Amino acid sequence: DDYLPGSRQTIAAADLPDGAEYYDFLAGHFTTTDLTADEIHQIGLGEVARIRAEMEQVKAEVGFDGSLNEFFEHLRTAPEFFYETPEELLEAYQAMSKRIDPELVKISRMIPRLPYGVRAIPDNIAPDTTTAYYQPGAVDGSRAGYYYVNLYKPEV
């Protein structure tokens, strides 16, 4: 009787007094740029278009006949993209982590000195947890970091 009738009909920050300026302030604060929210949005739209064009190019390169959505469904369901056993999947993760290591210098000048490994998420929680997560190593260097991977039902 009191709160709902007195509440706003809209939820956007832009609908508040000076809302557009406030929204631009928040966008700048969280992105550490001087760009407006509209400028950031335009960058996002451009990136979506660029990535979609690259996906269309990959679809064409592999000779897939069908729409982009059909291609995505194929990638999500075709058996050749899945490992048959948890052991095969863990080995693939471990091998990939070592192939990635020398490539890191291409994207960052600061490479952590602390080593990391790849471990399986424990079987008793794997069915109900995420695909993967990272546990950072100890700050004092006494324990490596570990990337935990879910090996539950790798075939699906």
Image: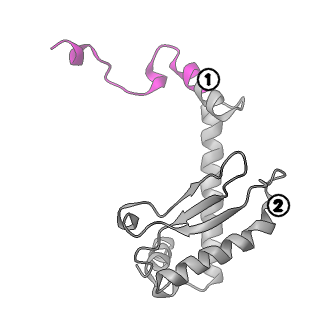
Residue 147, quarter of the rendered image: bottom right
Which residue bears the numbered disc 1? Answer: 25
Label total for image: 2
Residue 77, quarter of the rendered image: bottom left
* In the image: residue 11, left or right of residue 88: left
Highlighted range, magenta? 1-24
Of 96 and 11, which appears nearest the observer?
Answer: 96
Which residue type carries mark 1? Answer: Phe
Task: Say which quadrant the C terminus sits in.
Answer: bottom left
Which residue type carries mark 2? Answer: Lys
State yes or no: discs 1 and 2 in contact (Cβ < 8 Å). no
* In the image: residue 110, left or right of residue 10: right
Residue 4, quarter of the rendered image: top left
Label 1, label 2: how many angstroms apart (C-alpha)? 33 Å
Residue name at image x 84 percent, y 52 percent: 109
| Residue, far left | 1
**Label 2 crowd bin: few (<14), some (14–19), many (20+), radius 10 Å:** few
Residue 33 counted in the magenta span: no
**Which type of secondary structure does the marked residue at label 1 adopt?**
helix
Residue name at image x 48 percent, y 13 percent: 17
Task: Say which quadrant the N terminus sits in.
Answer: top left
Mark carried by residue 106: 2
Residue name at image x 22 percent, y 16 percent: 5
